[in-house]
Amino acid sequence: SQTIHQWPATLVQPVGSPLSLECTVEGTSNPNLYWYRQAAGRGLQLLFYSVGIGQISSEVPQNLSASRPQDRQFILSSKKLLLSDSGFYLCAWSQLLNNEQFFGPGTRLTVL
Amino acid sequence: AQTVTQSQPEMSVQEAETVTLSCTYDTSENNYYLFWYKQPPSRQMILVIRQEAYKQQNATENRFSVNFQKAAKSFSLKISDSQLGDTAMYFCAFEGDGGSNYKLTFGKGTLLTVNP
């Protein structure tokens, strides 16, 4: 069966510090991968998605970036965090076209 | 661009009763997919039910069923025999079958509380 992992679960970082959130999927190959952000009391906003190694599409201009160095690894990064980057970050995967997305447990990021 | 609207920010229901959550969407595509996700206090997003637009039959999953009205662009979720564990945020989501492949558009969610 497939599983998706995210770490860390919780992170508190000062403004201006770098960020690296990691997501890995097990039990499948060549998945579509996604990063979402969920602000408090709001829905999910798609940040990035990837259909293959090295292929990243950005949905929203921001100071975040994403990379996919391996087939089942998806990384969300920032060189300098802003207060507005605080939120709950969810990674998800799907297989091929128009299948449901399966979500990881999420990372709660607080920027102080 | 597609939009998904959930007009009920909060709802409550008594245990064992039935509740219906509303969702409407806007799209120019003819074929697409609709989903309901549940996010309990743990914040884990869990798929509840899925509907393919080309299927006329409404999807059902145990106590969960949908009323899909394609012409009205409406996709409501009915929860029968509500249980305390159904307390969660519920999100309606849309995925197109055209140029916007792969991407889910979410509504803002409905917070459902099941009262004992």
Image (tube, coloured by chain):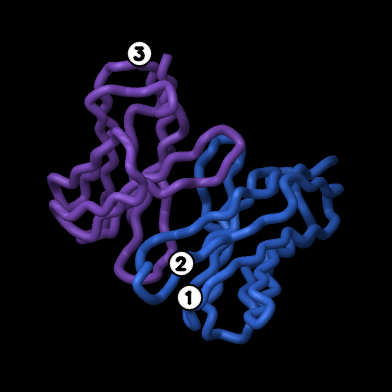
Residue type marked 1? Tyr
Q: Report the chain holding disc 1.
A: B
Question: First in sequence: mark 1 or mark 2?
Answer: 1
Secondary structure at badge 2 equals: strand
Q: Is residue B38 above or below residue B101?
A: above
User: Horizontal and vertical percent for residue B56?
Assistant: 61, 86
Q: Which residue is mark 3?
A: A14
Horizontal side of B13 relative to B76 (left or right) equals right
Q: Which shade is chain B?
A: blue
Q: Nearer the viewer, residue A1 or A14?
A: A14
Q: Which residue is mark 1?
A: B32
Q: Amino acid at mark 2?
A: Glu
Q: Chain of mark 2?
A: B
Reading the image, the residue beneath label 2 is B95
Residue B7 left/right relative to B95: right
Residue at the image point whose x is 61% and y is 75% from the top: B59
Disc 3 marks a residue whose amino acid type is Pro
What residue is at 70 percent from the left and 73 percent from the top? B67
Specify the quadrant of the image occupied by residue A1.
Answer: bottom left
Locate residue A108: give its quadrant.
top left
Which of the chains bears the disc numbered 3?
A
| Palette colour of chain A | purple
Mark 3, Cα crowd under 10 Å, few <14 / some 14-19 / many 20+, is few
